Amino acid sequence: MVARRAIVLLSGGLDSATVLAIARSQDYECYALSVEYGQRHRAELDAARRIATALGAHEHRTMRVDLAGIGGSALTDAKLAVPEVLAPGIPVTYVPARNTLFLSLALGWAEVIGAGDIFVGVNALDYSGYPDCRPAFIKAFEQLAQVATKAGVEGGRFQVRAPLIQMSKADIIRAGVSLGVDFGATVSCYQATADGRACAKCDSCRLRAAGFAAANIPDPTAYA
Amino acid sequence: MVARRAIVLLSGGLDSATVLAIARSQDYECYALSVEYGQRHRAELDAARRIATALGAHEHRTMRVDLAGIGGSALTDAKLAVPEVLAPGIPVTYVPARNTLFLSLALGWAEVIGAGDIFVGVNALDYSGYPDCRPAFIKAFEQLAQVATKAGVEGGRFQVRAPLIQMSKADIIRAGVSLGVDFGATVSCYQATADGRACAKCDSCRLRAAGFAAANIPDPTAYA
């Protein structure tokens, strides 16, 4: 494995942009990976490209997976509406096995380029209740990566780094600002317009806006 | 979860066809999943469609993932030759994190349709030395599935079933024949022709031919 080389999952949202900035601040050579999975908010992929360049990723790739083909989520199924009132429990915006899939793609690329670290912007505090954003999930994936790969079997060590996992949204925003992230270029909205303007109503928009308010930092988001 | 509903990973090869026949013989309603990942042997996807129908899968889907974009394997990278002499160690036909990715896709679909079982045709005996074909990998994925999913968190139990994992290739062939699998319709070759004829030289072809010989069953494979 190559020291200080990392895959960074980059959605184009606030969290993953901050993660990329954190990885760069730790002197990682960063290979940013975005996934086009049939999400309705494709403006985030355009945002990911701009962020990768702005934050100095060594390379950026967008991989396609047709998750819309299995449906089951408001984010990939046009027949399911994105909710504007948050019900208890795991919401309909949950995409089945999404982070498992994203980490699998990251793991494959990591093996090919000899990266031992995978950065992911999951968060277990100000999040939407998704099971695959919790520390238990990250730990289980690390254990899987060790036995799933040639590099792992041959003695390499894969680490999944989730630097935001215990941070509040306000903390994440403060960290990003201090590292020079332009949050105005990020897209978090689940139903952003084609040019990236946010709805202000979905769960993701509300968590984000509350984070800027709590951090006492002006919200640079472009709203529709 | 729906009892006796299962996802079956179906490559179009000998092993996964046998797995589908086994799952059907155990009265599972089978949702067969093939993955188009940029493999050079696409004839296997045509084979998968025919096998799914012949063996009574309830539904068959082919999902696309662009693994060729990350390279690193002779199966997805046109610049790397498929070897005809097997060197020691994990071979160049190993596709980084392939089974992790396939099981992730299966897990996503399983959640959507409420299936608790995922069948996969990995084999730890007459295999090519791939790390993601071993019992330790299957167990680690099961543990991951439990914490990664809404269904798992809410108390459902995911099981990854690998009925071939300790069988010899000859045993697999005998089992398949006894369950009515038409092995002439399956494609195992890593570099099959567009109409599915096999090279007889690659690792996969040789393991397959040796299996028919050991089982004392005529080899129905169409060779180029």
Image: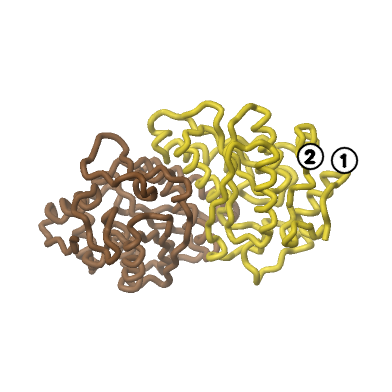
Chain colours: A yellow, B brown
Q: Quadrant of residue A147?
A: top left
- Residue A155: image location, x then y, percent: 41, 28
Asked if labels 1 and 2 touch by Cβ distance under 8 angstroms, the answer is yes
Numbered label attached to residue B86: none
Dot 1 lies on which element? loop
* One can see residue A155 in this view: yes
Dot 2 lies on which element? helix
Which of the chains bears the disc numbered 1? A
* Residue type, numbered disc 1: Ile
At horizontal 44% and vertical 29% (from top left) the residue drawn is A156
Q: In which quarter of the image is residue A20?
A: top right
At horizontal 70% and vertical 42% (from top left) the residue drawn is A17
Marks 2/1: CA distance? Answer: 8 Å
The quadrant of the rendering that contains the C terminus of chain A is bottom right
Residue at the spot of label 2 = A173
| Looking at the image, residue B156 lies above or below residue B30 | above
- Residue B141: image location, x then y, percent: 46, 46
| Looking at the image, residue B148 lies above or below residue A194 | above
Residue at the spot of label 1 = A217
- Residue B178: image location, x then y, percent: 20, 65
* Mark closer to the chain start, 2 or 1: 2
- Residue A67: image location, x then y, percent: 55, 60
| Looking at the image, residue A177 lies above or below residue B177 | above
